[in-house]
Image: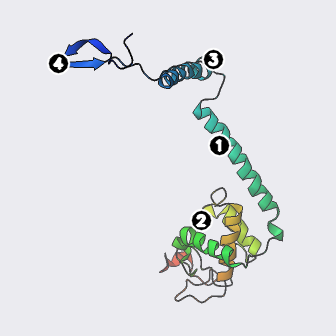
Amino acid sequence: MNNENEVELLHHDADGIQELDNLLPRWWVWLFWGCNIFAVAYMLYYHTFNLGDLQEAEYAREARAGEQLKTAALAAFESNLDSLQPATDESTLASGSQIYTTYCAPCHRADGGGLVGPNLTDDYWIHGTSYQDNLRTIINGVPEKGMITWRGVLKPNEVQAVASFIYKLRGSNPPDPKPAENTAPAASAGPSQFE
C-alpha cells in the first residue's frame, strides 16, 4: 500500500480521466449488508413461511376491531337513549349546528324550515316530538321517506349534538316555512312548492 499522502488511482483511464481507488466508508458497507439481510429475513418471514400478516390482512383485522368498538359504543349509547336530555352547552350546540349544516340542511333548510324533508321548527313531528324520538330518527333514519340512517356515520356524541341543535330549532319562526306535516296537502295534489 502507498503511503498516506499518496493518491491511489485505478490502473485505467478514459480520455485522460483517472478514477480514484477509494474504499466505501465502513458504516455504509454495514448499512448496505444490513439492508440486504433484513430484506431476506422479511421475505422469508412474511412471504415464504407466512408467519406474519401482510398489510391487507392486518388492515382487515384492525378494521374488524374498529367496527366492533364502533358497534359497542353505539349499542351503549342506544341503551341509554331514554335517559338522555338535550345538551345546552354552547360548544355542543355549535358542533351540532356544524353537523346540521353539513348533513341535514340540504333537506331541512339551514333554518330548519323544511325543503324535501319536513319542517323542524313546528310542533308537529311525524316520528315523535320527544328528544329521544329525535335521537332514534337520526340513528335509524326513515328510508321509506328518503332519510338515510346515520348509524355508523355519526358518532354517538355527534348524534347527541345534532339532535340537541335540532331540538333547539323547535318554536323558531323561519321565513316561509314548509307547512306542518299534519296540514300538508295530500300527495294526490302533486308536489308542493318545497319539493
For the residue pair 191 and 117, the one nearer the viewer reads as 117
In the picture, measured across the screen, residue 76 lies left or right of residue 175, that is right
Task: For marks 3 and 1, give the CA distance.
Answer: 25 Å
What's under tag 2, amino acid-wise?
A: Met
Callout 4: helix, strand or loop? loop
Q: Looking at the image, tell me whether mark 3 or mark 1 is earlier in sequence order.
A: 3
Residue 101: give x, y in percent of width and height. Answer: 55, 72
In the picture shown, does residue 157 fall above or below 118?
above
| Residue beneath disc 1 | 63
Q: Compute the Cα span from label 2 to label 1.
A: 27 Å
Q: Which residue is mark 4?
A: 16
- Quadrant of the frame with the N terminus: top left
Residue name at image x 66 percent, y 22 percent: 51
The residue that mark 2 highlights is 147
Residue at position x 80%, y 58% in the image: 76
Q: Of 149 and 15, which appears nearest the observer?
A: 15
Question: Is the residue marked by circle 4 packed among few (<14), some (14-19), or many (20+) residues within 10 Å?
Answer: few
- Quarter location, residue 18: top left
* Residue type (three-letter) at the residue carrying disc 1: Ala
Q: Earlier in the sequence, mark 4 or mark 3?
A: 4
Mark in front: 3 vs 1: 3
Please tell me whether mark 4 or mark 3 is closer to you in this view: 4
Residues tagged 2 and 1 counted as in contact (Cβ below 8 A):
no
Q: Earlier in the sequence, mark 4 or mark 1?
A: 4
**Tag 3 or tag 2, which sits nearer the N-term?**
3
Alpha-carbon span between mark 4 and mark 1 = 63 Å
